[in-house]
Every structure is written in structure tokens, then in C-alpha cells.
């Protein structure tokens, strides 16, 4: 039952990752844990670790830059920027504002963040699609970015499930990457305390095993709604993508979905079916770790970038879960030229360009991140091109404000240093931070 004639969905997609990673075996040995627990018990391989000059803003701006460099859209056609994130850098100012300025988007643009733990990116995608279809700004497209940095305390059970990524998506009526199929919505909300991050903390807290139970309860509720309203079973999908805090969670989710599917268990059992219809979507998550709101879209990019799969026309079932909680099961169809996205989303370049950290370097990078977030921690950005977080000065976050020249990349020649970009240079001092606004 497809109710809509106009098509809507993701027209283009770009992924950005931190420059460094930590191997989970290195972390396991440092924690006195059997590496098999992290590699096989949780299913991860590596986790992306941001440097002190990389935060959720920088990852989002870089992803937007890759998307726009691909000439996926004329920047003047973008009428809304929605950032799905749970790694906000300010309790009032949205990441979307920084993206809007640094990507050079037009001023007649609505910009805001959407927050609900790992569901924020999916919520933003759904709201953007409804806005485009609503037709308030005919011809305009929306830029949706899911960006997050997952940080848990050193030595905590959540530590091996850290990670970070940003996925930028152009939402419009020519869904070449993924068309959102117009089935009735299958959403679920329940106020639970399974995972949270108080505003005074830089790391998340989780009741880990309870959060897995909440995830599976929400999946069950969404799936019953979806299957009940559509009459479809799990067999209707070529691939199933699950929110992936760690890859083993997607196996647990698939087992549950198959148990409840009206078309009965898959031939050969749920685990064999998982290898066929879920595992091909997880290889990038295994490299990146948990990217919270971006995780589901890292799986989508992984499927598009899979070296042995041409997903053209594939029907996807996608499950998004945000602790706290809100969840949704939705269906999509990959565009007919899926193979055109291979080596084009930025994912493979970002993975190939990473450097491995030692455990000591990982600890140093965490300490440096904490320092950098303190007021008065301003320092000029190091070399390299592109946006960078340079510290906090007079209660304002300072970013290296690289110029973006469409189609040519970040132009280091036009960069201003952090000091030049600072609003506290001569002539700008009167714009210093004030209480309230
Ligand atoms: N070799 C292989 N597997 C091993 C192992 C070993 N030496 N030791 C343990 N394992 C397996 C366990 O059997 C378990 O697998 P199972 O779930 O299939 O039974 C898995 O590794 C994890 O072990 P467990 O003891 O449950 O891990 P934990 O209690 O230390 O932490 C989380 C697991 C998920 C609770 C923790 O990482 C966390 O809090 N994460 C953050 C919250 C989160 O991601 N929630 C998910 C829903 S949003």
C-alpha cells in the first residue's frame, strides 16, 4: 500500500570521520580484558577517536563540504539545515548555525538542531522530508546532517562502544540514494532512563543492559505497528539496517525481528539470514564504532560502498532507536544508480586516511579534549586545511574558518588562522560574550 505519488528521500550522501582510530584489541589489553570480548562479544574492530580540534561541529561542516563539493546541489537551493545530534557543543546555539555559515548557505534558511539521543538523525530526516513535501518553499531542498561523538568514561563498560562520524544528506524529490517509501509511520516513544548525558558532563552514562532491553522493546513495538499496518514481513526487504551501538546489537535485533515476523522465520534461521541481509551493512560500523545519531546512516553508506554488492533498487528496512526513548521502523528503496556512489560518499577516503593511536595517545587525546573545552583554552589551529576547533575564548567556541570554494575543496590559502577569525581581535572586542542574549 503506497499512498504517495511524489517521491521523497535522500538525493546525495557524504560521510566524514575523525582522523584517528583506536583498535579494540589495544583497548582490551590496556583494560585487562580478553580482546575476544570486544571483537566477538560486541562485534567491533576499531573505533574512531576525534582529535582535540575535531568536534561534532567540525565533522558536520566537513561532511556538508564533501556533499556540496560533489555538486549535489546548488547551495542557493537549500532552504533548511537540520542537524541531528546528541553531542551539542552549546545548550542554546545549534550546530546547524555553524554549518550554515561555514558552508556559505543563503540567509533565507531555517537552521536548527534535532535532539533525541541516537534517533535525532532519523527524526531530522523525517521532518525534512515532510517539509519538502509540504511545499512551503517550492524547489527548495533540505540539508540534514547526523553528527555525533560517542564518549564514555575510561574503564567503563561503554568505553569499547565509543566512536564518531558525521553523515550529511541532501533531502529532496529526486531520491537517487534512498527513496523513503510512503508506508504508515511505525514509531514508538517511552520515557526511560537507559542512557543519558547530564549537561555538566562530557561523557554519557548508561544502564547498559537495560538500554539493550529498551532497544529491543522499542523494536518490537515499531515492528508490530509496521507489519500490522502494511501486512509485510521481514521477507519483504533485501537488507535490514539496525541502529548499531555495537555490531552484536544488530544481531540481537535481527533475531527479535525474525521471531515476530508474520512471514515466519527465514530459511536457515535468523543467524544465517543476518549474515546475508544485515552483515553487509555493518562493515563500516565495525571500523567507526558507535556514531550515535549517524550510526544508521553509516550503515547505509557502508551498503552503498560495499565492494561486492550493487544495491540498486534494493528494498531496505531501517530501524532507528534513540535512548530515552523514541524509535521508528521505516522502509526505503535504494536508487537505480547505487553503484555510482561507490568511492563517492567520502567513507572510503576517510577510512584510508586514518592513523592508528596507541593507548597512551588515546588517553592524551581525551585529556586534551577536556582541556580544550575549558574557557580560555584558546590556541591557534595547527596546519592542514579545512575547519578546525581551536578552543574556547571568552565563553565562545572558536573555529578555524576555512573558506570553501565549490568543487575545489577546502582552500588552505584562504584560511584565516584562529586568531584572525577570532571575534576578539581589534575592532571586534565589543562583541564579547555577555550573559544572556
Ligand atoms: N569472548 C567472547 N565473547 C565474550 C567474552 C569473551 N572472552 N566475554 C564476554 N563476551 C560476550 C558476552 O557473552 C556478551 O555477549 P552476549 O550479549 O551475546 O551474551 C558480550 O560479550 C558482552 O558482554 P557483557 O558482559 O554483556 O558486556 P558488558 O556488560 O561489559 O557491556 C554493554 C556491554 C553493551 C552493556 C556496554 O558496552 C554498554 O554499556 N554500552 C553502552 C550502552 C549501549 O550501547 N547500549 C545499547 C543499546 S542503545
Image: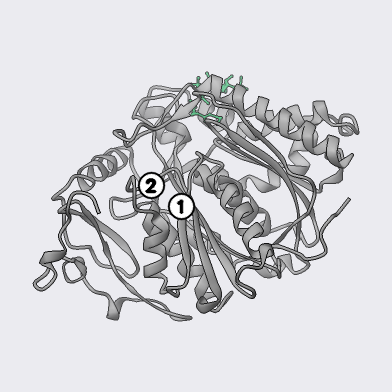
Q: Residue at x 38, y 56 (%)?
A: 57
Mark 1 C-beta to ligand 1 under 8 Å: no
Q: Which residue is mark 1?
A: 113
Pointer 1 with pointer 2, Cβ within 8 A: yes
Q: Answer with the quadrant where ligand 1 appears in the image.
A: top right
Percent x, y of residue 135: 66, 68
Percent x, y of residue 26: 40, 35
Q: Is residue 321 left or right of residue 208?
A: right
Percent x, y of residue 386: 35, 68
Judging depth in this view, the residue of 261 and 192 nearest the camera is: 192
Judging depth in this view, the residue of 233 and 356 nearest the camera is: 233
Disc 2 crowd rating (10 Å Cα; few below 14, some 14-19, many 20+) is many
Percent x, y of residue 2: 86, 54
Q: Within the image, what quadrant is residue 40 found in? A: top right
What whole-number distance in Å separates the C-alpha atoms at marks 1 and 2?
A: 9 Å
Q: Which mark is residue 241?
A: none
Q: Quadrant of the C terminus?
A: bottom left
Label located before the other in sequence (1 or 2)? 2
Q: Secondary structure at mark 1?
A: strand
Q: Is residue 142 left or right of residue 30?
A: right
Q: Within the image, what quadrant is residue 14 found in? A: bottom right
Q: Which residue is mark 2?
A: 88
Work out whether 101 lies above or below 154: below
Residue 19, can we see it?
Answer: no
| Foreground tag (1 vs 2) | 1
Work out whether 17 lies above or below 240: below
Q: Is residue 391 left or right of residue 123?
A: left
Q: Residue at x 51, y 24 (%)?
A: 194
Work out whether 138 lies above or below 211: below
Q: Residue at x 19, y 51 (%)?
A: 395
Furthest residue toward left: 426
Amino acid at each position: 500500500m503506497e499512498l504517495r505519488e511524489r517521491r521523497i528521500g535522500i538525493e546525495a550522501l557524504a560521510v566524514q570521520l575523525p582522523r584517528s582510530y583506536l583498535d579494540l584489541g589495544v583497548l582490551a589489553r590496556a583494560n585487562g580484558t580478553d580482546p575476544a570480548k570486544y571483537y566477538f562479544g560486541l562485534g567491533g574492530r576499531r573505533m574512531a577517536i576525534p582529535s582535540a580540534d575535531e568536534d561534532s561541529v567540525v565533522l558536520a561542516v566537513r561532511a556538508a563540504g564533501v556533499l556540496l563539493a560533489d555538486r549535489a546541489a546548488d547551495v542557493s537551493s537549500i532552504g533548511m539545515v537540520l542537524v541531528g545530534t546528541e553531542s551539542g557543543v552549546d545548550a542554546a546555539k545549534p550546530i546547524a548555525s555553524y554549518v550554515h555559515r561555514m558552508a556559505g548557505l543563503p540567509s533565507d534558511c531555517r537552521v536548527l538542531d534535532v535532539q533525541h539521543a541516537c534517533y535525532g538523525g532519523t527524526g531530522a530526516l523525517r521532518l525534512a522530508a515532510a517539509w519538502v513535501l509540504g511545499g512551503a518553499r517550492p524547489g527548495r531542498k533540505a540539508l540534514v546532517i547526523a553528527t555525533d561523538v560517542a564518549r564514555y568514561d575510561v574503564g567503563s563498560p561503554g568505553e569499547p562502544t565509543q566512536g564518531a562520524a558525521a553523515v550529511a544528506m541532501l533531502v529532496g524529490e529526486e531520491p537517487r540514494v534512498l527513496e523513503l517509501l510512503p508506508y504508515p509511520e511505525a514509531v514508538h516513544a517511552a520515557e526511560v532512563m537507559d542512557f543519558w548525558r547530564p549537561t555538566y558532563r562530557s561523557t554519557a552514562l548508561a544502564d547498559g543492559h537495560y538500554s539493550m532491553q529498551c532497544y529491543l522493546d522499542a523494536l518490537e513495538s515499531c515492528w508490530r505497528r509496521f507489519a500490522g499496518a502494511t501486512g509485510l514481513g521481514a521477507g519483504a526487504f533485501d537488507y535490514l539496517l539496525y541502529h548499531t551501538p555495537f555490531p552484536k546489537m544488530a544481531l540481537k535485533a535481527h533475531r527479535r525481528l525474525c521471531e515476530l515476523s508474520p512471514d515466519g522465520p527465514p530459511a536457515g534461521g535468523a543467524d544465517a539470514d543476518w549474515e546475508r541481509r544485515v552483515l553487509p551493512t555493518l562493515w563500516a560500523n565495525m571500523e567507526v564504532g558507535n556514531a550515535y545519531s549517524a550510526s544508521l546512516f553509516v550503515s547505509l553508506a557502508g551498503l552503498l560502498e560495499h565492494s561486492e554488492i550493487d544495491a540498486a533498487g534494493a528494498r531496505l528496512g531501517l530501524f532507528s532507536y534513540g535512548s530515552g526513548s523514541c524509535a521508528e521502523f521505516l522502509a526505503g528503496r535504494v536508487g537505480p544508480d547505487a553503484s555510482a556512489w561507490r568511492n563517492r560518499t567520502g567513507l572510503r577516503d576517510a577510512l584510508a586516511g586514518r592513523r592508528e593511536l596507541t593507548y597512551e595517545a588515546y588517553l592524551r587525546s581525551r585529556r586534551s579534549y577536556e582541556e580544550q573545552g575549558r574557557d580560555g583554552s584558546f590556541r591557534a589551529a595547527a596546519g592542514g586545511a579545512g575547519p578546525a576547533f581551536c578552543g574556547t575564548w571568552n565563553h565562545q567556541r572558536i573555529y578555524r574558518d576555512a573558506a570553501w570554494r565549490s568543487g575545489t575543496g577546502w582552500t588552505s590559502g584562504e584560511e584565516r588562522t584562529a586568531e584572525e577569525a577570532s571575534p576578539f581581535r581589534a575592532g571586534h572586542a565589543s562583541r564579547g560574550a555577555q550573559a544572556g542574549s
